[in-house]
């Protein structure tokens, strides 16, 4: 391997700043919900939103620039295995984007994951003093503590306050004529009532996975402090943080999170005093991991499912994912493209339409293909091997620059709150929450970070470092176990936190400050090039789309709506959701009771063009053909006086519905809507094919209804069941 290192014999302020800000840009992702999609429930569109796809893209750009700067300052080295893993992942990403349906999601989401991995590589390559790298431990624990406080606040009082505000908003919606008994609203209310906290993330499972990493790192720090020379009071700090994180995990209600935390505690206790070689430990951990995954697969195949409702849901996701993999076995369907493809292969008993298969390896295979799976597997192997180099390097073999151990501390202390302000919009774009934000986030983060960072220099002994290293190894391994039934590693926050833990663990096993060398112009040039590419293909198109979406939401007059719809559809040629959104806005305007008949037709025809553009960009997404079917049906209703035009439009709508049902066959409500078109065509033309389709769709809708749990919103309502009976009565024939 080749090493190019800095010419200075001591780390300067620039190295400290780049190291600290790069670490903070990863840590802050725990406190910012990533988002790549602007989809939001129609009944919450007037509620102020948080981070947007643009803020996610800008944060990715910042991380890329900082990582590139780190590599330029200190050069880079990478083993042959690391080069192979990186090459496979980059190749898999590029190929999957080329074959993805929604290329915007595939490009933005995939590049975000790769940039996070690049940041981890850059942090390792900086080879800063080990005392600096150990500050990553209090950094991780501090952001996890802030997330835990948020979780406890949500379950303690925020959800109840939100529920009260929702009831008021719901009354306003009902007064304006909105149906407040739709399934989306019922599901939203049930989520509020469950009080399952998710902190700053988007899902309780993800929040629990992140807090579990923090908990096991905290236990490692606690054991290290008990083994070292710390004062009698210091072990209280990591101990208190562990209690806080345990409470946060409990508040999420995640069974996987609780089980992972318990497994981690047992494993950490078992490794205490472990004397086996690194190779033996690595083999045992990997064998146990593969055996656990194999046991899940074996049980699923033998029983046709997994024990327990939660695990059985996962089995449904995995079996459906097998069909997604079969669609694109060599290329993958593209990052964040799993959801629409899964609908075509969802088992009949599955009630949920999920965006992720809840297994990191299944997700990588489905979205990035076999190249991505090989690259991710090799990267995981190399990381575990690096974390298990035995024994921990003793400080007596490393000459640390004196007086520099607190170099990045102040950068980190200020960096996380500042980055959170810039990229979350809180409290600048959320008036009235400044004091709450300062207490829940800034005070908690700063307090935990300072208290823990103050005790890190005392963990200088071999035994302390070994105990801390065991905590990191267990945290990484348990997180991989959690991701056998979860998806935190497919999120920016989850991957960033694991990367920080791995960097700290690798620093414990070797490396440290290495003086001498030279600046690398190669990586400086590559950084400029990659930043320019990311700006051109991710940031600027996302910014244009965001402006167009905002203008479309704010448009009030008819011509403003039409102009904003045109601008939205043209903003980003890789985004199939934008023209579909534009079509939906025009359809809503066309169906307004006061809209004149001629204007209604004009608007529907405009919407028809946008829907066709959406389907051209993403042909496999059933949402596009569903929009086309609805538009064609409304145009048929508007052509009541022209029998030929009405029949042609109904035939067109029927064709679109057939495509939609093929791509989403397990939705009872969708089949009922399609049957309305088939019945209308049958009544006008009397074609047996339309009648046969209507009977088949209605019968299958009833079968799917019967398969659903009594409390499921996927079941048909009483009114819908009555409509099914009425439509079946209108269709004659065998």
Image (cartoon, rainbow, N blue to C red):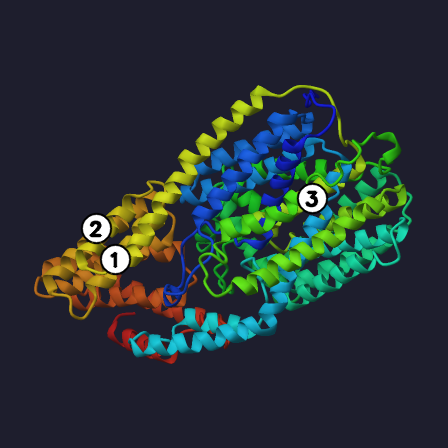
Point out residue 289 in the picture as x, y percentages from the top left corner.
Answer: 74, 48
In this view of the protein, which residue sits in the foreground, 225 or 693? 225
**Is disc 3 in contact with disc 2, using a CB cutoff of under 8 Å?**
no
Please name the residue that numbered disc 1 is placed on.
555
Q: Where does the C terminus fall, quadrant-wise?
A: bottom left
Label 3 crowd (10 A; few <14 / some 14-19 / many >=20): many
Q: Residue at x 65, y 48 (%)?
A: 413
**In-image side of 161 versus 557 (left or right):** right
Tell me the residue that label 3 is attached to.
409
Query: Residue 596: x, y in percent?
Result: 11, 65
Q: Is residue 582 above or below residue 251?
A: above
**Secondary element at image label 3:** helix
Residues under numbered marks 2 and 1 in contact, where contact means CB atoms less than 8 Å apart: yes
Q: Residue 630 in the image: state x and y as whole percent.
A: 26, 60
Circle 2 is placed at which residue position? Answer: 563
Q: Judging from the image, what secondary structure is the residue with disc 2 in?
A: helix
Which residue is pictured at 18% across the width and 54% down the height? 605
């Amino acid at each position: 391997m080749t090493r190019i290192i800095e010419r200075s014999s001591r780390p300067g302020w620039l190295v400290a700043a780049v190291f600290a800000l790069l670490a903070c840009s990863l840590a802050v992702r725990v406190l910012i919900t990533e988002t790549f999609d602007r989809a939001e429930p129609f009944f919450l569109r007037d509620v102020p939103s948080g981070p947007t796809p643009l803020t996610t893209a800008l944060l990715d750009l910042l991380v890329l620039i900082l990582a590139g700067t780190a590599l330029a300052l200190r050069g880079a080295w990478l083993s042959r295995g690391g080069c192979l893993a990186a090459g496979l992942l980059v190749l898999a990403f590029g190929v999957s984007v080329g074959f993805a349906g929604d290329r915007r999601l595939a490009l933005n989401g995939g590049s975000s994951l790769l940039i996070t991995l690049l940041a981890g590589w850059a942090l390792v390559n900086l080879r800063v003093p080990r005392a600096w790298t150990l500050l990553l431990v209090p950094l991780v624990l501090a952001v996890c503590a802030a997330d835990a406080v948020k979780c406890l606040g949500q379950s303690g009082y925020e959800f109840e306050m939100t529920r009260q505000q929702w009831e008021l908003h719901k009354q306003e919606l009902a007064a304006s004529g909105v149906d407040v008994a739709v399934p989306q609203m019922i599901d939203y209310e049930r989520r509020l009532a469950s009080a399952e906290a998710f902190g700053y993330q988007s899902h309780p499972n993800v929040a629990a996975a992140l807090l579990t990493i923090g908990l096991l790192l905290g236990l490692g720090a606690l054991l290290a402090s008990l083994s070292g020379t710390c004062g009698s009071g210091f072990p209280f700090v990591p101990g208190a943080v562990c209690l806080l994180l345990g409470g946060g995990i409990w508040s999420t209600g995640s069974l996987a999170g609780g089980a992972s935390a318990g497994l981690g505690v047992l494993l950490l206790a078992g490794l205490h005093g472990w004397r086996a070689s690194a190779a033996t430990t690595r083999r045992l951990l990997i064998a146990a991991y593969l055996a656990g995954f194999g046991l899940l697969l074996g049980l699923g195949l033998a029983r046709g499912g997994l024990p327990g409702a939660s695990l059985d849901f996962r089995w449904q996701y995995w079996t459906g994912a097998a069909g997604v993999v079969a669609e694109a076995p060599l290329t993958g369907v593209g990052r964040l493209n799993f959801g629409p493809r899964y609908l075509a292969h969802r088992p009949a008993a599955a009630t949920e339409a999920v965006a992720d298969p809840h297994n990191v390896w299944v997700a990588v295979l489905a979205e990035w293909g076999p190249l991505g799976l090989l690259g991710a597997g090799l990267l995981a192997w190399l990381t575990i091997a690096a974390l298990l180099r035995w024994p921990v390097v003793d400080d007596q073999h490393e000459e640390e620059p004196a007086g520099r151990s607190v170099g990045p501390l102040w950068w980190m202390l200020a960096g996380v709150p500042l980055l959170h302000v810039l990229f979350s919009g809180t409290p600048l774009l959320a008036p009235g929450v400044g004091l709450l934000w300062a207490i829940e986030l800034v005070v908690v983060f700063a307090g935990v970070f300072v208290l823990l960072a103050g005790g890190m220099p005392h963990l200088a002994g071999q035994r302390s470092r070994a105990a801390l290293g065991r905590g990191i190894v267990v945290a990484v391994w348990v997180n991989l176990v959690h991701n056998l039934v979860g998806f935190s590693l497919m999120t920016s926050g989850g991957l960033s936190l694991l990367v920080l833990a791995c960097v700290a663990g690798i620093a414990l096993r070797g490396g440290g400050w290495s003086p001498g060398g030279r600046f690398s112009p190669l990586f400086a040039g590559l950084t400029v090039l990659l930043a320019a590419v990311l700006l051109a293909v991710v940031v600027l198109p996302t910014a244009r789309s965001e402006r167009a979406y905002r203008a479309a939401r704010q448009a009030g007059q008819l011509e403003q709506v039409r102009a904003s719809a045109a601008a939205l559809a043209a903003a980003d040629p890789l985004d199939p959701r934008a023209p579909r959104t534009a079509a939906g806005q025009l359809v809503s305007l066309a169906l307004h009771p006061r809209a004149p008949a001629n204007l209604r037709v004009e608007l529907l025809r405009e919407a028809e063009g946008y829907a066709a553009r959406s389907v051209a960009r993403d042909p496999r997404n059933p949402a596009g053909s569903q929009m086309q079917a609805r538009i064609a049906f409304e145009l048929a209703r508007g052509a009541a006086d022209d029998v030929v035009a009405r029949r042609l439009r109904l035939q067109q709508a029927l064709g679109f519905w057939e495509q939609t049902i093929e791509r989403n066959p397990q939705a009872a409500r969708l089949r009922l809507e399609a049957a309305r078109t088939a019945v209308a065509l049958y009544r006008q033309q009397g074609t047996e094919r339309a009648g046969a389709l209507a009977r088949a769709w209605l019968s299958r809708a009833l079968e799917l209804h019967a398969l659903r749990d009594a409390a499921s919103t996927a079941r048909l309502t009483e009114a819908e069941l009555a409509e099914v009976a009425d439509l079946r009565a209108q269709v004659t024939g065998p």
